[in-house]
Amino acid sequence: MGISLSCCGITCGGSKTKILDARIEQEQIGSVYDKIAPIYDIWGKLTESHASDKAIELAEIRDGQSILEVAVGTGLTFCEIVTRNPNGSNQGIDLSKGMLEKATKRLSKLSNSNYSLDVGTAFDLSIEDESIDILVNNYMFDLILFEDMDKILLEFNRVLKKGGKLILVNMTEGERLGSKIYDIIYNISPKTMGGCRGVKLSERLQNRGFKVGVREYCQQMLFPSEVILAYK
């Protein structure tokens, strides 16, 4: 049986399958994630932890760097960043106050307090131009309308230093057996998926002036992720 997917009514590549676009308004994302914040760690550890571990590996953090994580969530990755960069600058932002509360509680257990956590949006970063060595972004672009993605990439480009690293982790299009189940769930109820759908960003990054060094596919509990290392 064929699966009917939606993407602004545009069929991609002449196939019967259509690429999914975002179906939850940006203004709603904060409240959606406020509600799922209490249980998000379970989901993250079961389906996203392998990809997040790979992202940290690719970042090759050196103590003393300036690091920004956009969409910090409950702080699972940010905690590792702060641990590896105790003498650097560590900044994390998220739209969801509920997720930030969880992140703040997690980070409070560290002896290192060299970090900041704030409510913020990727569309308008309160960060100086060319001031960031590494920008980390986990599972956010899979919530963003395709037409809005370039606005965020321009902001990322603005704040990164020349030669700075951009580390992206996204839900991506499934490539292995069983991974398409998440497309079916998304079509039935986008909020069940937290608004996430599969995206592939390498080409878009290159079109916006980034050099893609690594793109890896990772599947955990059938959930498909892409991990990308790109340079400004």
Image: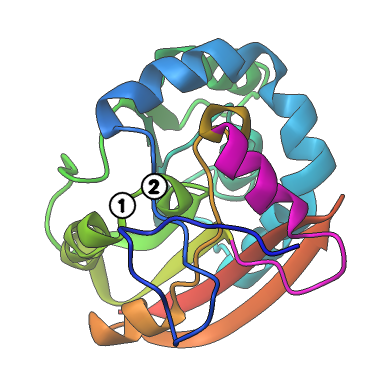
Residue at horizontal 40 percent and vertical 74 percent from the top = 11
Q: Nearer the viewer, residue 215 or 61?
A: 215
**Residue at the image position 53 percent from the left and 35 percent from the top:** 190
Residue of label 2: 22
Disc number placed over residue 4 in the picture, else none? none
Mark 1 crowd level (few <14, some 14–19, many ≥20, 10 Å Cα): some
**Closest to the observer, 151 or 21:** 21
Amino acid, disc 2: Ala
Kindly identify which numbered label has been placed on residue 145: 1
Could you tell me residue 226's position as x and y percent?
Answer: 62, 67
- The answer to whether residue 128 is left or right of residue 102 is left
Disc 1 and disc 2 in contact, CB within 8 angstroms: yes
Element on which disc 1 rests:
loop
Quadrant showing the N terminus: bottom right
Q: Report the residue at 78% width, 60% height from top.
A: 179
Give the extent of the magenta segment: 172-189
Note whether 1 is above or below 47 in the view shown: below
